[in-house]
Amino acid sequence: MTAGRKVNTSSQSWCTPPKYINAIKDFWGGEIDLDPCSNEYSMVEAKTEFRLPETDGLMSDWNYPTIYVNPPYGSDRCRKTTIKNWLAKCVFAHEEYNSEIIALIPVATNTSHWKKYIFGAADAICFLSDTRLKFYVNGIENEKGAPMACCLIYWGNEPKRFIRYFQSYGAAIDITSLKPVNKKSRLISLFDVNTIIS
């Protein structure tokens, strides 16, 4: 078990609880344009879904207005990827296409991926008040709940609206002050993303 999910040697699919899917859809006016890491049990029902093995979400284009990401939390040994690859892609899509992105991830503020792709790159965070988030595993609610705290990370142009909307779900804070003055100095190029993935 890695951060609440087994690595890719298991066939389990961990899906977002419906209350968060509904909240995110409501925040974006009723629908989500892209779910780049969907699975057969997903309840997100985005307009476009990327799903393995047919489509690798990390290698596909994310030029969509709104994107919801519930990435694999463990490492994918076959593709040699981890959660940091998904977060790098979130930053790239926001900076390259001005996409609005919300990601559901574990709270791990001491990690390199938080320091590189969240602090100084994202716009807001909601630390969820559900202490043991009950993901759906292969379509069935996991009664034990996740063994770690989770949060929603927001890359977008409306952090104040995100905070107002999600403050009922936990501690929502604006982190735009952590961004450098010259945004171009933070831009993650497609080369960087591909280098991280390969």
Image (cartoon, grey):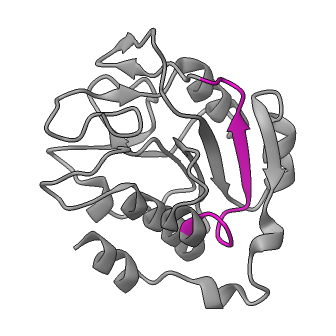
Task: Pick whichever, 140 or 108, lies toward us.
Answer: 108
Q: Which of 76 and 55 is in front in this view?
A: 76
Residue 82 place in picture, x, y as percent: 32, 57
Residue drawn at the location 66% of the way across and 63% of the way down: 122
Horizontal arrangement in the rendering, residue 78 relative to residue 167 (left or right)? left
Say if the magenta span includes residue 128.
yes
Which residue is the extreme one toward the front?
Answer: 110
Name the side, left or right, on which 1 lies relative to 135. Answer: left
Residue 38 to residue 133: above or below? below
Quadrant in the picture for residue 197: bottom left
Which of the 4 quarters of the picture holds residue 165?
A: top right
Residue 4 image offset from top left, x and y in percent: 40, 32
Magenta stretch secondary structure, dominant? loop
How many marks the image carries: the answer is: 0
Q: In which quarter of the image is the C terminus?
A: bottom left
x 19%, y 41%: residue: 8
Q: What residue is rendered at 17% in x and 59% in y?
A: 79
Q: Position of residue 106 (x, y in %)?
A: 53, 43
- Which range is magenta? 117-131
The N terminus appears in which quarter of the rendering? top left
Q: Which residue is drawn at 16% across and 54% down?
A: 77
Q: Nearer the viewer, residue 47 or 80?
A: 80
Based on the picture, tell me whether residue 148 belongs to the magenta stretch: no
